[in-house]
Structure formats: structure tokens, C-alpha cells
Image (spheres, rainbow, N blue to C red):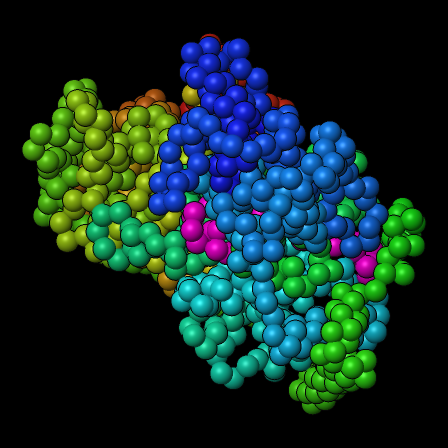
Amino acid sequence: MSNNVLFAGSPWSAFSGPNLGYVMEQYDLFLQSPEQVEPELVALFQQFGSPVIGNEQGVTESVTTQPGNTGNIKKIFAAVQLADAIRAHGHLAADIYPLKDRKLDSSRIELASYGLTEADLVEMPASLFFNNAPGSVINGKQAIDYLRSLYTGKIAFEYTHVQEAERQWIQDKIESGTSVFNLTAENKKALLERLTRVEDFEKFIHKTFVGQKRFSIEGLDTLVVLLDEIVRKADEEKMKYLQIGMAHRGRLNVLTHVVNKPYDMMFSDFAHVPNDYFFPTDGSLEITKGWTGDVKYHMGATHSKKSGMKVKLAYNPSHLEVVSPVITGSTRAAQEVTSNAGNPSHDPSKAVAVLVHGDAAFAGEGIVQEVFNYANTGGFSTGGSIHIISNNMIGFTTEHYDSRSTQYSSDVAKGYGIPVIHVNADDPEAVLQVAGLAFEYRKVFGKDILVDLIGYRRFGHNETDDPTVTNPLTYQIVTKHPTVRALYGEKLTNEGILTHDQVKKLDEEVYAEMQASYDHVKQVGAEKGHFDIEMPEAVKNEYPVVDTSVSKEDLKQINDDLLAWPEGFEPQNKLAKILNKRVEALETDKIDWGHAETLAFAAILRDGNPIRITGQDAQRGTFSQRHLVLHDKNSGAELVPLHNVSDSKASFSVHNSPLTETAIVGFEYGYNLENDNALTIWEAQFGDFANMAQVMFDNFISSSRSKWGEKSGLVFLLPNGMEGQGPEHSSARIERYLQLSAENNWIVANCSNAGNYFHLLRRQAKMLGTEAIRPLIIPSPKSLLRHPLAAASQEQLSEGGFQEVIEQPGLGGNAKKVERIILASGKVTIDLADRVQDGKEYDNLHIVRVEQLYPFPSQKIADIIAKYPNAKEIYWVQEEPKNQGPWKYALEYLLDLADGKKVKYVGRPEMSSTSEGDMDSHKIAQAKVIDEALAK
């Protein structure tokens, strides 16, 4: 017997007379020597304890004798095993495949497999299997038949792997019948109309726009029914937001019927008529647009219901699963209140994420596991997402036996204790039942749940694809298989709710409505014509100059607040000394990187912008430089000093994240989109760890404004610098971000000074919520974190601002003598500064630190060059190899600035790796770079 016995009640009521006496004797033996007891009985004793039955007063009591005979005790054990097997393995025999093209396995739930007959079961009471057996279920045979009907029908359940309380709750819901929808005749008519609209939408596009891709929903039409019911439930619960993430298949239908994008708007997209002409005038629909645009089946929208709840379908590229963390991050932001000091308040009942996955991608893409992994962590939980596999049983042309190694595409979820409900997509009433159960589970347990909606794909991967080339047998079945609308229409005629003529008339009326919408589109298109979307003026321009200074008085107050620990709180001794030195550092102009950053955060909170920072070691900082969360050395209690800054007007949260890059970057991007007033920061443990999140940078962060009109102010801290730690901990791959730089899509800043970093963060915060906002990429330092030449002065923070270029102090004093101008960025500028010291021996050259790489500060550099009329050469110095780093990006700008001067590269040669592999080789190579740059 499995340890996952799923009895609703105690099995002891099935025993009486000698059998009960035997069980009691075995229980006594179990207490003394369990190894001598049959394993089946051990399992029962472990789960149910001492054999008991209820007396007339309902009080349980131990029993030693009972007249009567229920038959062979082995038969009872076998019946228990059978019931257990039906609950645990009934899904293998369930009618969940619309095409009936998968072999079902009932071998584990056959009576013969357990040595049972129907007569044996008739002799047993139904109470053996249920807490409260349905009134019509009297004996064991009826109980087993009832269980079969529940677990092998159009809905199949996998939940034996979940925690006990959840398992019992799900079982009670299934077996009590309370999750079953009892639809009225009017409900059923409405459901048929919904299915008719879903199907006719696809039919109309297929006929009217021949050969155009739409990635149709056909074969999974009830996805709309499923989403409808989840939306209805969320609205009933007075939620404020429901956010949907999905790939391209079925997206146009969901946009139209769940997010309420009007038919004429959708048809105008196919007809190449601007859909702005058909925008609802009641403000119920929100759509953002970029100037380059994107294909129809990547677009999103937000619908505001009359109740005030917003239903959002997120924009998403073709990389399928990558939208899932974006939606969960956006949902978390919608659940939080960030307008008060301290931690943000988090209420999961305010919003829910619904994540629609493809079957092949769900099993194949690792980001699915990443999202499951953070679902219950403190900084990334959303109170449970409702996952839906839109399962068309194939991946492009790849069959399941080539795309995964598991029984179901959903199996990855079971490793995270997530219940899985499979449902036949051809049964809309079963789909409604599953939607209600999934929503209620999320509400009760605050955890993820997965619905595997099993259907098929009526056409190929897209409408230009011929699936019979690779899947001929499947499509022989598909072409003969009725649509779900036809099947449900037939069901309603058989029930006498509608006639065949009424079903046909409904189809004709819906189709005619769509034709009328398209006729309107053609008319408007002929009258008004096309227009282009222009890049907003705020994006064309660089950031405006804003005041980012903080007065000395405020800096002192902030510094004091940060060090005012509660009485009795004792941080680790060494750390306490380091932090307490910040009092002196403020006065002596030795404000290091971590200190300047914390002061910037505090000032931003006082301005009213909440801050959220995450990363694998964000609280302490990878290099032990930050210490935003302190730990009492005696109790381990945590203290966040930024929660205690006087006059703070917003929340601050910092979370150490799971060892995941792609999903966490996506989460923070989604969070930032929803809360555009929050300074949202993701820090890589080392800069090149962002390699693992490249899809997020390529498809969302760098291009979402131009494609979809989505504004992001997300900040990335990417530790960067050649420190002799080997290839994987050196370069943040600055060249990759510079290669993606265009149309003022973001800012790439490589600061060499803690004060400049302070103002850079402050400037970004000032831009939040404005049309000008854009992401900020910062290749942050490692050795400069405590380098005295990178420290800030109090005056720099109180009177300065962000400088896109910085001239090296002590150089360039005698303009006529300067023959070489060195341009460099980031940490290598401090290596140069360390060598030149006061500059007395280097009056032939000048060094300019390029603190902002993109947009490239050409005019500011040109103004500096113009001050040195005798300059003959411009050097670009970098520590990265020649084929990496900023050189090839900067070269075009340098040639424009040179005006006949020689432009020369100084740095490592082209390399396939990012750096040398050991410290000695690194020191030699680095010294060579500096020597060549400064050579007379």
C-alpha cells in the first residue's frame, strides 16, 4: 500500500468481529515491534492511529470486539489500495484527449489487479472510502464506481504529491461534488454564444485574410472560457488587477474576447488600417504603441471593467515563456503599497497572475522552473499564480516523445508541490469547473496551481504551414473532428435547450456582426488613410538637467539616522567599526562607493520614490560593500537602517534573490513597468552573470519602448573590471549593451567616482514616471568600491551633479604642451590616475574620463579637445580586449572628433576569452596597457 493513502475518513469502521480483534492485536504488536506487522497495516496505523469507531454520541473510542463479519481482511486492504490507486492514478485512464489518440492505462485501477470482485465490494460499506459518502453511495462497489466517475472522466487530477492539508482539501472538493457547475439553460446558451464568437472570429480571419498568420486558438477554444471564469471569479473577489501572460497562439482571440479589444480594431490590424480610428471612447481600453511596432500576435492591451478591475494581457516576443516572470513581477507591484516608509505592504488578494504556457515550451524551457522556484520566496511571491498549459499536444512539428522525457508536459510542476488538473478542452462545462477550483485553491492556500488544458491544433504551427507533411496521421483525425462549438451545440439540442436551427442562426448572426465590423474598417480606411507613429520628443532628447544635490545639513541628518541603531542592537564587531567610520568619512571627504550609494537611496526615499533592489547578494553586496541589512550578532535579528531615515516618504525593500538571472531580471522589469515611480534595481553577482538573462535585454529592456511603447526605468548594476580573477569574473560585456544602443533606448554609464554614481542614481530617480525615462546600465566597479581615488567629497554630493565626462585633476594645465588626449572609461581611468598622481611629469597629455558611454557625450568631449590646439593624437584606453569593451563602439565617434588627429587604440589585443586566467599574467598585461598609454 502506498504511503499516500487518500481516505477521506477512518477505515476502522469496515472491521468487526474477529477481523477487528485481529487488527487490535496487530496494533498492539505495531507499538512494540512494527517490523513484525504486515506493511499494509503499518501504513494504516501510521496514518490513522489506534483502530476506533464512533459511539452513539459521536465520540470516538477504541474497540476490541464487534459482532459480525465483513469478510477477508485481505480484501479490505485490497479495496483500500484500489481506492488509493484511483485517486492517484486515475488520470492515466481519464478521457482527457479530445482526439482520443493517446493510449489510456487502466491497469492500476482494475478490480482484477487487486484480487477483487464486484461481489467483494458490495459487502463493504461506503464509509470505508469517504468521510461523508454521497447519499446514493451505500456500498463499496458504488463507492468505487463513484470514484472512477470522478477521476477518469473529462477532468483528471494529480495531487498526491502535495502537502497533506492541500491534498485533503482537493480531495474533499472533488469527492463532495461542490466544485461541479450546475448551469442553467440560460448559462448554457451564453456559453454556446461565447464558443461561437471564439470560433467565428478565427473562421472570419481565415476566410477574409487568406494566408495571414494569426496562430489561431482553434482546438483550444475553451481557453477563452477558462480565462473568462477566472476573470469573473477575480472580479467577484473585488480584485484590482488580473494580469495575463501568454505566447502568440490564441493571443488575438484572447485580446478580442477576454481583454475586449473590439472586432474593428482587430480587423484593422489585418487590413493595415490604423486601429486608433476604432478606439473605444469610454476609456475602457489601454494600448501603448512604439514607433517601430511589432507583429499583431505580440501585442498586448489592458481592459478596465465597470467594477474598476483591470484585465491586462502583456506584450510578449516570440520567446514563449519569458513573459512569465515579467507578469509575476508586475503582479507583485500591483499587490504592494509603497507610499509609506519601511517595507512595502503586500496584499496578494489585490491582484493575480495568470500564466498561459505552450506544452512544448513548458516542458522544455528552464525559465519555467525558475519561476516556480521563486514563487514562495519572500521577495518574489504573489500569493500564487494560476498556470495554464494551452496544450495542443505538439511543438511546431515535434511530437511529445522527442520534446520531453515525461508522461505529461506538466510534470515539472509536481517537483514543486503544485497540483495539476488535466481537462479535456472539448468539454466547456468541465473547463468551467476546473477554472473555479483553480481560483479557489489559490485563494485558500496562496500557492501556484496548474491547469493542463488538453486540446489539439486545427491547423499547422501557423496558417501558412502544412502540418500533414510531418504529422499526417494526427491530421487525418483533426480534419474529421468536430469543433467544440459544434459539439456543444449538439449537446444543447439533445438536452432540448436549443434547436438545430437556433444553433445555426446564432452562428450566422455572430459571423454577420464580424462582417459588419470589417466593412466599417474598409470604409474608414478608404476615407482616412494611414499615418506613422513618431518617436516622442522626450525620447529623442537626452535627459534634462535636474538638481540632484543634497544639502550638507540633510546629508548629516541622513548619515546620523543610518547609524542610529536601536538600543540593544549589536552588529558584528568588525562591521560596526566600518559603518561607524562613515561619520568621519562624511567630514573628511572619504565617502566610498557603498556609503555614497546608501546616502543616495536615503535622499531618494525622502523625495518620495520607493526603492526595490534585488540580486543574489544584494543585501550585503557581493564585495561586502553595501550592508543594507544588518544582523544582530547575538540574536540574528535583522535591521534595515534605511527604514529609519527621517522624513522618508516611501518604502524601501532589498531582497537576496534565488540563484537565477533570467527570471529575476524579467520579474524586476515587470515590477518596474507596473510601479513606474519606484527606483527598481537588479544587481548581478558579477557583471557577466547577466549573460544568462540576455533574452530579457534583447527582447524587452532594450527595445520595448520602440516596439510597444512601454516605458522602463530599470537600473542594472553589473560588476565590471579586470582584477585578475579570471575570465568569468572580469568583464560585464559592456560591448553587448553598446551594440544594442540606439534611439536613446537606455543609458550606459561607467562611473569612476562614488560621487558621480550618487548623482547618477539621483538623476534616474528624478526621471521616474516621466516620458523621458529609460533604463540605466551601470558597469559597477569592484576594486574602486574602496579605492581612495574613487571616493567622493561631501561638497561633491551637496553642490555637484552627474558629469558625463570628467577631466583628470592635475593634468592639462598648460594647454599648449598637451599633444595627446587620452579617453577612457571606468576602472582603468583610476589605474591611469594612480600612475600620473599630481600630473607633474605628464604635462604632454590630458586624460578625460568618459563617465557616460551612451548616449556618447560627443559635444562635451569636442569642447575639451578644442582647448588643446597642439594635440596630435587621441588615445582610447581600455582594459578589455580590443574586440570587446567600448572601443569599436567609440571608434566612429572618435573619428568624427579627431579632425585630422591620429586615433589610436591602447589595450589588450583581440582575444576569444575576456581576460587572462591568473593574477600574475593579469598584472603583466594590465601594466603593459598603462605603460603604453602614458609612454613619452
Q: Is residue 918 above or below residue 366?
A: above
Left or right of 862 on screen, residue 899:
right
Residue sitting at x 81%, y 44%: 102
Residue sitting at x 83%, y 59%: 459
762 magenta-colored: no
Q: Is residue 341 above or below residue 881?
A: below
Task: In this rendered view, identify the residue nearer to me: 800 or 520.
Answer: 520
Q: Is residue 557 above or below residue 71?
A: below
Residue 584 occupies quadrant? top left
Question: What is the x, y in percent for residue 346?
Answer: 33, 52
Question: What is the x, y in percent for residue 933?
Answer: 45, 26
Left or right of 415 on screen, residue 645:
left
Residue 653 occupies quadrant? top left
462 magenta-colored: yes
Q: Is residue 898 above or below residue 685?
A: below
The N terminus sits in image quarter:
top right
Left or right of 284 on screen, residue 494:
right
The C terminus sits in image quarter:
top left
Does the rendering let one see residue 834? yes
Task: In this rendered view, identify the residue nearer to me: 508 or 65.
Answer: 65
Does the rendering let one see residue 518? no
Question: What is the x, y in percent for residue 559?
Answer: 14, 40
Residue sitting at x 19%, y 25%: 635
Question: What is the x, y in percent for residue 851?
Answer: 39, 42
Task: In this rendered view, identify the residue nearer to me: 664 or 195.
Answer: 195
Q: Which residues are magenta?
A: 438-464
